[in-house]
Image (tube, coloured by chain):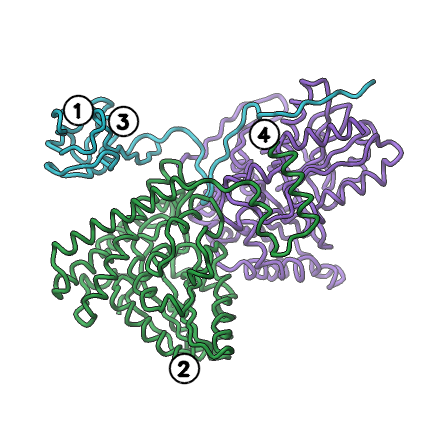
Chain colours: A purple, B green, C cyan
Amino acid sequence: MTELIEHTTGTATGPTVELSMQQALNRALRTLLAEDGDTLVLGEDVGALGGVFRVTDGLQKEFGADRVFDTPLAESAIMGMSVGLAMNGWRPVPELQFDGFAYPAVDQIVNQVARMNYRTRGAVPMPITLRLPSFGGIQAPEHHGESLEALFAHTPGLKVAVPSDPGEAYRLLLQSVRCDDPVVFMEPKARYWDRRPVELSEPADPIGTSRVVRPGRHGTLIAWGAMVHRCLQVAELAAEDGVDLEVLDLRWLTPLDTDGLAASVRRTKRAVVVHEAPLTAGLGAEVATRVTDACFGDLAAPVQRVTGFDVPYPAGPLEPQYLPSVDRVLLAVQRTLEY
Amino acid sequence: MPQHASAGRGSISVDHLPPDLTRELYRHMRTARDLDTEAIALQRQGVFPAYVSVRGQEAAQVGSATALDPDRDFVFPTYREMAAAQAHGVDMVDYMASHRALWHGGLYDVAASRFGAVNAVVGGPVPHAVGWAVGERLRGDDGVALAYFGDGASSEGDVHESMNFAGVYGAPVVFFCQNNQWALSVPNDRQVAGGSISARAQGYGMPGVLVDGNDAGAVHAATAEAVARARRGEGPTLIEALTYRVEPHSTSDDPGRYRDGAETERWLRRDPVTLLREAILAAGHADENALAEADAAALQEARRIRDGVAAAPEPDGAELFTHVFRESTDELARQRRTWQEEVEL
Amino acid sequence: MAEENVTFHLPDLGEGLVEATVLDWEAAVGDDVARNDPLVEVETTKSAVVIPSPHEGRVVELHAAPDEVVRVGAPLVTFAVAAPDRPAAGIVGTVPEEEKRPRRRVRLTPPGE
């Protein structure tokens, strides 16, 4: 196993560290556990193993088995127990090992976590951050490549965050755990190994704001998670053809940054939303509607969606045919250019 | 009775079993062992993205699967039941296709094989066994459902709910827990409150049996009794076969992070294939020559399966859309055209 | 340094040979060998040859005893070698390969300005 090696370089503004997303998340959890004695990390294999993607590596050793602990294998109980911990004043950061294993816990997440604050008229907050390794792209077995964001975004009372690179992962996780509302924190598995310089002192933008990752003039590509990277690839290729695309990382799926979306698309006049999840009732429909409502008069073409198909997430060799490819996104861009 | 802290007795006996049955057990276990070794190699050679070894669990799986009637009964596996599939007569090239990621559930015919699809959500298939078994009773048939699950899955609500249902309906189900003592990195003492999975049977109104999971004959006898009981209409049984996961959880796992290698070494010395081989010789059920022939045949079969799965064609992209519905939709047809125009292009 | 096991399989030592007999191991389990150190002497129907070690590392397992016949392609020896500095996969799946420049077929027409 490769050890977690961090390369620190000093800068004028603060320490910049080159980290993979795994390491950035680990760093954030260490910060959180150190700053608030009420923060707890729990889940299957988060202790001695350090998590199946090493995100909780070393935390049990550093903070003890009372604050970082393995649970038996039962997702619904992990979330239900987190509710009880939160009711008793703790700040739980449960991990459900893979996206597909969140389904057995949906009852607790939707029926309990999401509405406890509402049900109790604010008497019982749920400062729970559910860490959920999510989405496809790693040739994993069945139930290890699901996109559940529409389900959670559609559940009132949950906030949903999806980081797209190590720095974002670091900042968004700090923000999510510090937030007194429940957050579903979806970690894009395919980007876990992506290494970037992370500026540890960089302040986070407010919850619910998107960010422009690459400015452009001719259209906006809207994405979250690993698809942000895909859109950046597309923008590079489009630039070779003289088409200048903006890439907007939505990063908070609830609250959804309608203002940020509108500001971008009003300038570029074209929008393509890209996600891994299936098309029908996917979050792309919501984004497209918001953009259309806000920018109807400015749009040069209808908002396009490039998504997975309405099929169960497929096995390894079919993954590249399911996930939005650069060509599919380019074709959608072309449709907006030709409209 | 084997204790969790020890690796149990140093030998087993098959004196009480028919000689041809012990040879059959050996043939399946040897084949599964060789296929497992080939599968690990295929992962290292980049043919499989990952693999989950069954090494050390061959007796638990083969001993139980051979107690079923493959024409009448139905097996509900999770994802580490390769040796059970082999013993149940599943097409193993098509089974191993799941590990090559050619098709998530495997490519074998689940209905004809009477062996459920490979399933990663542990515990999920256990209620299916109850439903299938109740269905047999409703129709007046005498098939028995056998659900495999592990010590980790025994914590899942689905498993407890299933045992309660089966108890309520008197369903012909064998709940077969392979307790390999490690749910990924979590050992029994932090997984199983009270320390015994089989003891839970009492609360659900069924017999609970703890058996040495590395003793193929003992597993077979215990399962045969549970199957016979279910077939007679006397309801479900919970069997806990105590064994050990000698390999990492998967080919990407690093057990050095969480368990003592000396414990694994002890269990490796109690290898179920070796134990059975020695017991067969001691019982005079076969001689060295016959077992050497069986070894050679098993190796040949394992290599045939290896070559078959390594050479199997990748699925055509159009199969993304083929089995979503029995009666497909216009919308899916439209998306398939999009795929043809934009992905196949 | 992390290690990983690598198994060396008997190569075809001559045109179309299908097997070879192990004559003598020149390395034992636990030995550290350098690449191209003499590893094993084998005899084919054509000749006896010494196979040099294909890896630098520690011998973990010899898969055949002297006088044993080994089929071409069968495991011969397993080495523990220094693992290349690459990220470890999660418990399932693979580490995705980073495309330096993704393949494209679609070309765009810029908007008239």
Which is nearer the eye, C92 or A184? C92
Where is residue B12? Give x, y as percent: 19, 65
Tell which of B47 and C31 is nearer to you. B47
Quickly name the residue at label 1: C38
Q: Secondary structure beneath disc 4?
A: strand
Tag in front: 2 or 1:
2
Numbered disc 2: secondary structure: loop
Residue at screen point 34% across, 73% down: B209
Determine crowd level at label 3: few under 14, some 14-19, many 20+ residues with C-alpha closer than 10 A.
Answer: many
Marks 3, 4 in one chain: no
Q: Is residue A140 above or below residue B135?
A: above
**Same chain for the residues at labels 3 and 1, yes or no?**
yes
- For residue A166, the mark is none
Q: Is residue A72 visible?
A: no
| Residue receiving disc 4 | A198
Q: Nearer the viewer, residue C39 or B136?
A: B136
Give the class, few, some or many, for how many residues have Cα within 10 Å of label 1's Cα (few <14, many ≥20): some
Query: Which residue was labeled with disc 3?
Result: C55
Residue B217 pos. (x, y %):
24, 67
Mark 3 or mark 1: whose residue is earlier in sequence: 1
Q: Amino acid at mark 4?
A: Val
Seen from the viewer's position, the closer of residues A32 and C7 is C7
Secondary structure under tag 3 reads loop
Marks 3/1: CA distance?
Answer: 11 Å
Are labels 2 and 3 assigned to the same chain? no
